[in-house]
Image (cartoon, rainbow, N blue to C red):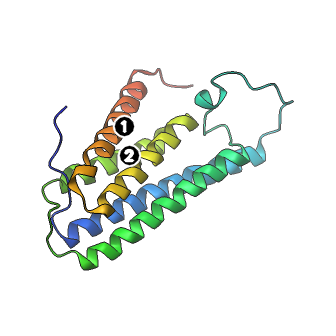
Amino acid sequence: MTEPAIAPANADDLEALADSLSACADELHTRLMRAIRQRATTPTPAPSPPGPGDAAAASIDHGISQGAAQALFENEVALRQRANGLYLDAAALAVGGLRGMQRQLLDVTAQARETLRQVERLKDMIGITSELLALGAAIASGKVEHLATPYNQLKRLVDDLRRQNAAAPPSA
């Protein structure tokens, strides 16, 4: 896989990226609140011993445990903090060594936001938010060499999930 020429070209581009990360945090918040409301209205079944892979197969749309909700809320807060940091950096960034990747970064974060809207497994939601956080941290560092890995991992994860969703039969 070729490494993209990564990075926002100017302060406006960096601000647009911060907007995109904020939108991802908004989508995560929406899904979390829906899952919490679902949990509150669904009768609690008798507890069964956890089996291997239970967390990986858990669906966000069938409610969420307190621990999982807390972890995802922490990811949401961290995404918002990264976005806020990027807004501050945008004010200070005139034109630096970070150029050429703006469209690709905006595209992958928009795809991540859409995937967050549709993903069912908790494991996948955590994976997406973790990769978004890594991407935000790499962008905030201003070091081009740190951007390729989180960008490629997020892109791969989003692409894989989109392929899985396209291949899955519609639920009735």
Q: Residues within 10 Å of mark 2 (few under 14, many from 20)?
A: many
Q: How far across and how far down the image is residue 166, in percent?
A: 38, 26
Residue under label 1: 158
Location of residue 133 with respect to 42 vertically, above or below: below
Q: How far across and how far down the image is residue 23, in percent?
A: 41, 59
Q: Residues within 10 Å of mark 1 (few under 14, many from 20)?
A: many
Report the amino acid beneath label 1.
Answer: Val
Left or right placement of residue 74 versus residue 1 in this view: right
Location of residue 56 with respect to 149 vertically, above or below: above
Left or right placement of residue 34 versus residue 78 in this view: right
Left or right placement of residue 101 versus residue 69 in this view: left
Disc on the earlier residue, 1 or 2: 2
Q: How far across and how far down the image is residue 97, in percent?
A: 14, 63
Disc 1 secondary structure class: helix
Quadrant for residue 123, please give it.
top right
Marks 1 and 2 in Cβ contact (< 8 Å): yes
Q: Look at 71% across and 22% down and name the residue there.
A: 51
Q: Look at 47% across and 64% down and name the residue there.
A: 80
Residue at the limit of the structure toward the right, as seen here:
46
Location of residue 5 with respect to 1 vertically, above or below: below
Disc 2 secondary structure class: helix
Q: Look at 51% across and 41% down and name the residue there.
A: 125
Residue under label 2: 112
> How much space separates mark 1 and mark 2, taking CA atoms?
6 Å
Mark seen at residue 133 = none
Q: Can the viewer see residue 120 in this picture?
A: no
Q: How far across and how far down the image is residue 75, in percent?
A: 53, 54
Q: Nearer the viewer, residue 45 or 85?
A: 85
